[in-house]
Amino acid sequence: MIIDLHIHTKPISPCSNISPEQAINEAKKIGLDGIVFTEHNKIRSKEEISELQKKHDLLILQGNEFTTLQGDVLVYGSNNNTDDIISVQELREFVGNDGVFVAAAHPFREFLVVGIGALKLSIEDGANRPIFKFMDGIEINNGRVSDQANKFAFKVNKKLQLIGIGGSDAHELYEIGKVVTEFQNEIKNENDLVKELHASNFEVKKFRK
């Protein structure tokens, strides 16, 4: 199954220019089997997702992208919401450990602005960031950051031996499916998703140019 694990839609994510309906239709158009809405700090109601699921022949799941003091964090399998900006340790305590998968989102996005050379950051330095102590995985391929930043995240994750995930991080329609995750087994719900992420039964790949 080919799924985009990281999509933002309005109005919950005000930074996005995509509606849920537009995201679903675009995903179907380009051949995805499923999408995951990862709105900022909030999730939609189960009723709304259920209605969308009934209306469209596409797997529609939810995650969350929390803003923490140490960086952005993707959480799958949790229904918890918060508008507070908390530490990554507090977030981990907030969402718990059972039935969830927690990953650092685009952890080296700052390279878009200053570049690796300007930061003078080594793989060792990158791996020592406090955020990673509380993560199950790292987003090693994000559709909105530079190849340089993604490659650095891949190398850091290789050193840490966490689970590398990927997604488009779409905020615009044309970004959906830029980076996808191809799962070996069928995914039917968030529980399946979390299980397969922990088992690393997937491959992260570029899908849409």
Image (cartoon, rainbow, N blue to C red):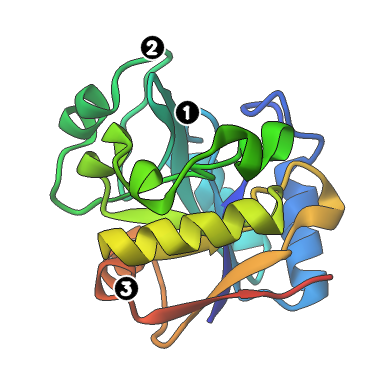
Residue 12 percent location from the top left of the image: 62, 27
Closer to the camera in the image, 53 or 128: 128
Rendered location of residue 86, percent (x, y): 32, 16
- Give me the C-alpha separation between circle 2 and circle 1: 11 Å
Q: Amino acid at mark 3?
A: Glu
Measured as percent of width and height from the top left, residue 59 is found at: 55, 67
- Left or right: 209, with 50 as reference point: right
What's the residue type where badge 1 is placed?
Answer: Lys
For the residues labelled 2 and 3, the Cα–Cα distance comes to: 30 Å
User: Are circles 3 and 1 on residues that touch, CB within 8 Å?
Assistant: no
| Residue 137 seen from this side | yes
Q: Residue under circle 2?
A: 84
- Asked where in the image residue 207 lies, by quadrant, the reply is bottom right
User: Is 198 in front, or is 117?
Assistant: 117
Q: Which residue is mark 3?
A: 196
Which residue appears at 74% of the width and 65% of the height?
27
Q: Is residue 86 above or below residue 97?
A: above
Q: In this rendering, is residue 195 above or below 183?
A: above
Circle 3 residues within 10 Å: few <14, some 14–19, many ≥20: some
Using the image, tell me which numbered label, if any, was put on residue 143: none
Left or right, 188 with respect to 162, comes to right
The mark closer to the camera, 2 or 1, is: 2
Q: CA distance from mark 3 to mark 1?
A: 23 Å
Q: Which of pointers 2 and 1 lies earlier in the amino acid sequence?
A: 1
The numbered mark, 3 or 1, whose residue comes first in the sequence reads 1
Q: Quadrant of residue 180?
A: bottom right
Residue 18 in picture, x, y percent from top left: 79, 41
x 43%, y 14%: residue = 83
Task: Mark 2 and mark 1 in contact? Answer it, CB < 8 Å.
Answer: no
The answer to whether residue 8 of the structure is visible from this angle is no
Residue at image position (32%, 69%) is 192
Please name the residue that numbered disc 1 is placed on.
42
